[in-house]
Amino acid sequence: PWHLGQAALTFARLAASGNYPPGRMIVLGAGYGHDARLFARHGFAVTAVDFAEEAVAAMRQLNEAAHPVQALQADMFELGAKWHGRFDYILEYVCFCAIGPARRGEFAALAARLLRPGGLYISLAFPIGRRLGGPPFVVQPDAIIELFSEQGFALQHREFPHDSVPARQKIEELIILQKANTNQTN
């Protein structure tokens, strides 16, 4: 359920829209780095993090010299203080659903630490549903928004993307949240 073999079409639409000026982006749970490379091609300075050695090796092999992505093999929860406040954007797709529900508050706090004030958290929340078990664990967009609001984020946009792959239509939702313009979190 994880690997599409290409960048998400919804992210391609966002990158091409001109509404998100290039900046520093971190992709959490980047997998093979398709989404990371997409944004690098649009002028973003991208750091892509994944826990899996195989995924990071693939990212490095697929890296493009003209549009490099910094690929890190790391536990994202252990990213140190040198990463705090460095990013204008966080991109997430099929990372949040891999996190057990008990650790999701930790993830929102991590996002708050990594983003600069005013930065954007951009997520394709998947899979929306009610089934038990995982991973992938189901996600509830309203619960994600609430969890991030506790860290000082405000909803900027949400939609069921028309350009989701057919198997994911109506079970993924684009959520864009903005971190408050201060260094304080709730």
Image: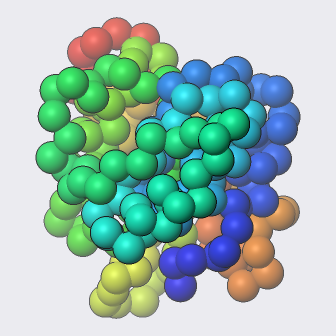
* Left or right: 119, with 162 as reference point: left
**Relative height, residue 148 to residue 126 (above, below):** above
Q: Residue at x 27, y 28 (%)?
A: 83
Q: Is residue 4 visible?
A: yes
For the image, the number of numbered tags is 0
Name the spot of residue 82 as percent of width and height, x first.
21, 24
**Above or below — where is 182 with respect to 101?**
above
Q: Residue furthest bottom?
A: 132
Q: Which of the two residues, 147 or 53, is positioned nearer the viewer here?
A: 53
In the image, residue 113 sits, relative to residue 134, either above or below, namely: above
Q: Residue 5 at x, y = what percent?
A: 66, 74
- Report x, y in % for residue 80: 16, 34
Q: Which residue is farthest top?
A: 182
Whether residue 150 is visible here, answered yes or no, is no
Q: Nearer the viewer, residue 26 or 52?
A: 52
Q: Is 11 displayed left or right of 116 in the figure?
A: right
Q: Residue at x 21, y 56 (%)?
A: 75
Q: Which picture quadrant has residue 170? A: bottom right
Task: Examine the rendered structure and indicate whether residue 44 appears above or below residue 35.
Answer: above
- The percent coordinates of residue 152 (x first, y second) are 34, 27
Q: Is residue 4 rendered to the left or right of residue 93?
A: right
Residue at 40% over, 62% down: 56
State the colouring used for the structure image: rainbow
Q: Nearer the viewer, residue 180 or 120?
A: 120
At a point 45% along the width and 83% down the height, the residue shown is 130
**Dividing the image into 4 quarters, which one contains the C terminus?**
top left
| 76 relative position to 158: left or right | left
